[in-house]
Image (cartoon, rainbow, N blue to C red):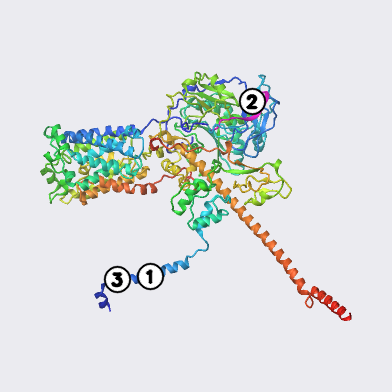
Amino acid sequence: MALLRVTSPHGHGQQSTSQVMSQVLLATLPGVAALTWFFGPGTLINIIFGGLMALAMEYVALAIRGRDPRPYLKDYSVLVTSTLLCIALPPYSSWWLLTVGMFSAVILGKHLFGGLGYNPFNPAMVGYVVLLISFPLQMSTWAAPVGWSGAPGLGEALTALLQPATYDAITLATPLDVLKHNQGLLLDDLYRESASFGQWAGLGWEWVNLGFLLGGGWLLYRRVFTWHAPLAMLATLGLAAAVGFDDGSSQSGGSPLFHWLSGASMFGAFFIITDPVSSATSLRGKLIFGALAGLLVYLIRVAGNYPDAIAFAVLIMNFAAPLIDQYTQPQTYGHGDRGEKS
Amino acid sequence: MIDTLMQNPTGIALLALLGLGAVFGALLGFAAVRFRTEGNPIADQVNQLLPQTQCGQCGFPGCRPYAEAIANGEAINKCPPGGQETIEALASLLDVEPEPLDAEHGEEKAPRVALIREAECIGCTKCIQACPVDAILGAAKVMHTVIADECTGCDLCVDPCPVDCIDMIERKTGIQHWRWQSPDVIASDRVAA
Amino acid sequence: MIEVHTIKGGIHPPEEKALSNPGHVIDCPMPPKLILPLNQHIGAAAEPIVAVGQYVLGGECLATATGLVSANVHAPTSGVIASIDDHPVPHASGLSNCCIELIPDGEDKWLALNGTDDFRQATPADLVTAIRCAGISGMGGAGFPTAVKLMASDRTPIDTLIINGTECEPYITADDTLMQVNPAGIIEGAEILAFIVGAERILFAVEDNKPEAAAALTQAVVDTASSVAREVVTFPTKYPSGGEKQLIEILTGQQVPSGKLPADLGIVCQNTGTAVAVRDAVVAGRPLTHRIVTLTGRALNKPANYRVPLGTPIEFLLSIAGYQAEQSSRLVHGGPMMGFAIDDPRIPVVKTTNCVLAPTEQEFPSAPSAQACIRCGHCAEACPASLLPQQLYWYARARDQEQLERHNLFDCIECGACAWVCPSHIPLVQYYRAAKGFIQDSREEKIRSERSQARFEARQARVEREAQAREAKRAARKAAAQAKTTQDTEEDPIQAAVARAKARKSEQEVTE
């Protein structure tokens, strides 16, 4: 009898899940470097500690579910989840914040639904939202972007991680925060006066976003994902911002450039909404998914309670992804106008 | 009167509930008459899913009686010719949990047909009378033979034969009936031994 | 010059065509025995008309087609019929089927062949009969009896004949070689086919990775005159451009409606090898007995294109080509994308054997275990039929027949592009083949069960009728008996007799 495993096609295109995942991890480097340059080693500590916690939790979860953990640990999928979440968390977060975050992402956001490939929501965003709602204070205090020399050193960073009660942080409101709480200043004046602003957008944040843009561009070049979702999101975000810009008045929601280079815009566009498992499948669907996500980001930033909105926007669109899929199915060969329906 | 009602909140609540009950009761009564169906459509739908072997292994005299019993709450896992496939389809139709085939009623076997060993046949017509789909050709003292295309493999002819000359042979053998098999469960879903 | 269109999806696997040195044919020596399956085509098996021990000549018909969709089988050489028995055949199942075993006598004596010099003197129907008698079926891989395909022109008008020299699968170079070695035969065969179906134009389709073949065909077109428009069309290489449906879309921009045939669009598509076989049958009177087979893969010392008599055991071919068994990871009948693995190398070459592939482990590493689907969507991007392989995968695992049909599972051409790109190494095509199988089974079972139900109900009705008839008869008999008793209204005869006896007795007593 012919072996079941040996069936056509007999060759393979050589892409593998671990290759895709490791490329994503590599692509985060420019952004992480920018974060480290401006905010100190906090993000790196986050990533390392979070990564270890995530690996441990993944192993335990798979063991409890009776699955073989090796293929999953080898394909770096959980490391991608943990890295993305840790990038989104404030640097110098405490160990318990990271642990709860990893638990929410890996266990609640992924394994409870069936593991890799079965989760309807982006696990990193699930972790982020659980933390944001449960610990609003810790999640909204960001370190000040004082540059490498002024930032806390390694020792202080480890203190922040392991003995958070004794850590004294120097914090500064993020640019989105500042905009949200703007009390009647024209945007130009606001930019000049607040210490949070740099050349085009937030101090430090503009470079972080440019770093993630670079990484995302490389992933596009490597065909890890297509241009549809990121471009749709950024274009819609920019368009909405342009509509709401109002010439820089005190009521303004911020310019398109500001929105593109603030908060997690680029990070969200290239690393979060491109998660294949939880987003729309067809190319047309990805366009719709990205566009609506971009719109939601702008609306929540400007009219909602939270300064940054990527996580909420993405989770709301994850709800809508199956519906989008259903209505954006491509027309099969031989059906429709170019062939009669049989 | 409105004033007295307004003074008495319990009264209003009671009146409201009575009113709603009356309205919905009237609607339901109307629907029961207007949309009445004859017969038992569930039993028909269940019967469509059963394999129509008419073998009686489920304990009922044929597929239709079993279908009606299922429509009245009988367990769905009593049909061996239908196999697990039919149990799943019934579970899906009736919105109940599928269960494994009840071993008391038999095992799932590959589809079979009856074959009479003609050299031994005595022409007694007992098998012809037993066949629920009239798939055996013949008459008294004349050779009997099974029309293979019409035989459902129900086994009911085997016992009545006084010379035990009927074999049950597998229907789907040979290269024409071969089908591709689904791949093994994927590696990462295989439960670690 | 016609406008060339593009198909959606598709992939670009490494071609590896140069490995088998296209453009040169080596004549394969006659093997010690030939195994000729009675079924080398789509449709019913042929029926043998020879007996064991019979001596036959080359070109002699050994088995005739049964029914319309079937084909004849001929002897590739002279020899003796050794057996007509089950033997492993080229089939994905590895199962056996009935074959005629012919032992060549080495003399290669042939029947007298009668061709025709000017095929235009014959009617299309006669030519179709000649093709049918020659046992020709599609040689591109599917094996549909050519005569039946050509008869489609009786129902719908045909304006375009496409000669398919695309050969999009990697490694295979049989058609490329044929186009370079015998372009005149292809052109002439195409003329005959166009005459039969009444086509107004012929398109010779060649991918742009075969410039020599395209040039040879173009030269042959220039060198011959024709009453129909002919064009050699080259287009960018992409797998699977050579599939009939995809090729029609590339050349005409139209899509064959689902469930319909190319003939419904006025198009007939034939492989280059089939065209040459048609030419040989009509002009030379030669039945289909040989074909070009590509033997390739790095586990062979002498990969090349061989002209092989049908029925040659593949193990013989492998020994001719210098097969290194310890280096090969598997044997494939067909190409790397759609061919099936060979377990038993005793299987013979048949009319649809375009390639035998013997790769090393490095060429085609064993597939790692499949991982979870990460819903990346690459499969949908690669699908040339614009299906949703991901959804088909989920529904195939769930055995959800309704959803599979709604997602057009039966429009899948099983090209394997989706499985090629899947980063999780999921054997997608295998799921679809299995799903098609169980849906076909389920449809057959449904028809059967409906018949059984009808017969059962008819029997119930008959039994009921007979019972009623018996009941009616019994009632009638009873009524007749009742009627008889009530006729004797005054006297009950027995009572009367008793009374008479009593009366006589009492009279006797009185007189004494």
| Whole-percent x, y for residue C218 in the image | 52, 28
Image quadrant in which the C terminus of chain B is located: top left
Element at label 1? helix
Relative to C341, is A167 on the left or the right?
Answer: left
Which residue position holds label 2? C76
Residue B82 image label:
none
Q: Is residue C231 above or below residue B159?
A: above
Q: Chain of mark 3?
A: B
Q: Outermost residue toward the bottom?
A: C510
Which residue position holds label 1? B23
Q: Chain of mark 1?
A: B
Residue at x 36% of width, y 35% of height: A68
Which residue position holds label 3? B13
Between the residue at mark 3 and the residue at mark 1, the CA separation in whole angstroms equals 15 Å
| Whole-percent x, y for residue A212 in the image | 24, 36
Between the residue at mark 2 and the residue at mark 3, the CA separation in whole angstroms equals 97 Å
Q: Which residues are magenta?
A: C77-91
Q: Residue C5 falls in which quadrant of the image?
A: top left
Residue at x 41% of width, y 40% of height: C380
Nearest to the observer: residue B111 or residue A125 = B111
Comes first in the chain, label 3 or label 1: 3
Image quadrant in which the N terminus of chain B is located: bottom left
Relative to A78, is A140 on the left or the right?
Answer: left
Q: Is residue C433 magenta?
A: no
Residue at x 67% of width, y 19% of height: C107
The kind of residue tagged 2 is Pro
The kind of residue tagged 1 is Val
The kind of residue tagged 3 is Ala
Q: Is residue C89 magenta?
A: yes
Between the residue at mark 1 and the residue at mark 2, the CA separation in whole angstroms equals 87 Å
Element at label 3? helix
